[in-house]
Amino acid sequence: GLVMPEWGAVAVDVFFVISGFVMWHMTAGENTSVLEYFRRRFARIVPFYWAVTTFVLAILLVAPSLLSSSRFDLAHVIASYLFVPWLHPVLMGQIAPLIVPAWALNYEFLFCMLLGVCLVVPLRWRAAVVIALLVAPVLLPLVLHPASPIAFFYTQPFLLDFALGVGLGWLVWNGYRLPGGWGMAAMLLGFAVVPFLTPPPYAIPQLGTEHQMVVRVLQYGGPAFLVVAGAA
């Protein structure tokens, strides 16, 4: 049947695929040192995120009644500043920082750090290495069962969206293009299938949920890839 309220779930996947695509082009097109890359990424991400987190923390301490969806927990606050996945003190079982929607930023931060380390890899092998490092953690739950929030969070299939973006970036970087109107067709197809998808088993990564790797990638990563590939 038609699933109306959950359409927005695919936005996270589109965002991650775009991130993989854009970051691949940025690093492949620049002769930037690893240290300079990290300096730029920290300058772009960290100060603003810390400022907003501090603002929310101040409200939580001064007027906690205004934030019914959270409460002060020192370990959770420290983890939020350090981009470490942590169980939310109010949203039971869900892994999210003080600013709840910033759980997606934790994945973004990990991907940026991973890509920066891979700058030491020659360009012709770099995409393959990055993709392998993104795919490997997602396969771990097939043989292991991560119980800690950090291990569970970083083995979720969201990482495959970044891998799809990097792969797409590599294809475009090497001159591959969809002929004629196929790009527009791919983008429209990606949008068209979303309303008919089954909603994901979770929005925020949550301990105790079944690991839905194949389902998540096919249902949301696939359409997200089509949208970004068609646009590219």
Image: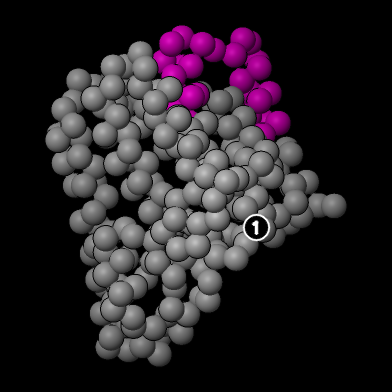
Q: Is residue 222 left or right of residue 229?
A: right
Relative to 38, say whether 65 is above or below.
below
Residue stretch rendered in magenta on the structure: 165-190
Q: Mark 1 — residue?
A: 210
Relative to 73, say whether 104 is above or below.
above
Q: Is residue 196 visible?
A: yes
127 drawn magenta: no
Q: Majority secondary structure of the magenta segment?
A: helix
Relative to 165, say whether 5 is above or below.
below
Identify the colour scheme used.
one colour
Q: Is residue 17 visible?
A: no
Q: Residue furthest toward the right?
A: 1
Q: Residue furthest toward the front?
A: 143
x, y percent for residue 193: 74, 39
x, y percent for residue 225: 58, 32
Q: Quadrant of residue 37?
A: top left
Neighbours of disc 1 within 10 Å: few (<14), some (14-19), many (20+): few
Residue at 28 percent across and 78 percent down: it is 74
x, y percent for residue 166: 44, 28
Relative to 1, say whether 167 is above or below.
above
Q: Is residue 97 left or right of residue 203?
A: left
x, y percent for residue 29: 28, 19
Residue at 35 percent across and 22 percent down: it is 126
